[in-house]
Image (spheres, helix red, strand yellow):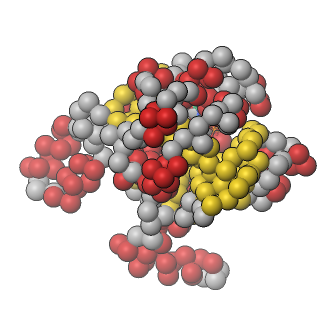
Amino acid sequence: MSIETTRKKVRTVVFPVAGLGTRFLPATKVIPKEMLTVVDKPLIQYAVEEAREAGIEHFVFVTGRGKGAMEDHFDLAFELDATLQARNKLAEIELLKESRLLPGTSSFVRQQEPLGLGHAVWCARDIVGDNPFAVILPDDLVHAEKGCLAQMVEAYEQVGGNIVAVENVPREDVYRYGVLSPGAEKGALVEVKGLVEKPKVEEAPSTLSIIGRYILQPGIFSILEKGQRGAGGEIQLTDGMAQLIGGAPFHGLRFDGTRYDCGDKVGFLHANVAYGLARPDIAAKFGPALKGFLAGKL
Ligand code: UTP
């Protein structure tokens, strides 16, 4: 891989959204997990907006059976649009516009079998081609002044190579994450010396863990192609990334912002409260109601 490739602009994002979402059954029996809403917007739309803010131009969705609602969500809703136009509902028309992707800027590819996150990313190889690309897991929602991916793109423009968003998690939780062996630190960037997926608590090299944001070089595809199984018998992205270390630069970015794990019920409820309180149109009523609830008055 040439140096030029490791510095090329990041134009494409991959959303691996083929998972089964079993932790949210029965909600996810028919509705994709990524269509669950935080306040009034589906998780996948937050992810698309974060990518747009970071300058991304093409959006790749790696889906599976039963995930068609996402494709419809980003399409033109012709009848609804026409009805709102006829009723002169300007604010609602604007909301629909924000949820559209322009023709030709999105691709949908099927993973067919949920063989793991690494396999899902590999399914996007033909569309990404020989270019660096971003990956966003929509169930990790990051509340931040500047979007998490925009922060990563800014860092990428300085150092190139591969970048993962990282944060410290409680030691007892490391077994759920990809964990770093950290090297030298420079500002918010941490050199990645090693990576291990879902380590045992007593064996984790640190508590610095990867959240669902990545900028990767296309060299990852030939590694994932081998289909090596890792933790849980799945083809793990972390194991593939570990094999990139030593080539192009590889950094963790301690991003500014708060992450909510919306793949988990408690994290999802937490996000709804936080995003509700951050919305001026909702906080005025919701804030006092929540206070009353916590004081045992409701
Ligand atoms: P999760 O570990 O959260 O799995 O995947 P899941 O199936 O979505 O949810 P649970 O655990 O059954 O409740 C993390 C991300 O990786 C994607 C998921 O869609 C999610 O965005 N993924 C995972 C795939 O696209 N394909 C896979 O084979 C596995």
**172, above or below 81, in the image:** below
Percent of width and height locating residue 153: 45, 50
For the question of whether residue 72 can be seen, the reply is no
Q: Quadrant of ligand 1?
A: top right
* Residue 227 image offset from top left, x and y in percent: 66, 18
Quadrant assignment, res 226: top right
| Picture quarter with the C terminus | bottom right
| Above/below status of 297 relative to 33 | below
In this picture, residue 197 sits left or right of residue 53? right
* Residue at x-position 44% and y-position 20%: 126
Left or right of 95 on screen, residue 122: right
User: Which residue: 43% across, 24% down?
Assistant: 129
Above or below 58: residue 139: below
Residue 166 in percent (x, y) is at 64, 53
Q: Is residue 168 visible?
A: yes
User: Observer-nearest residue: 249 or 71?
Assistant: 249
The extreme right residue here reads 202
Residue at the spot 41% in from the left edge and 79% down from the top edge? 284
- Residue 77 pos. (x, y %): 23, 38
Snapshot quadrant of residue 70: top left
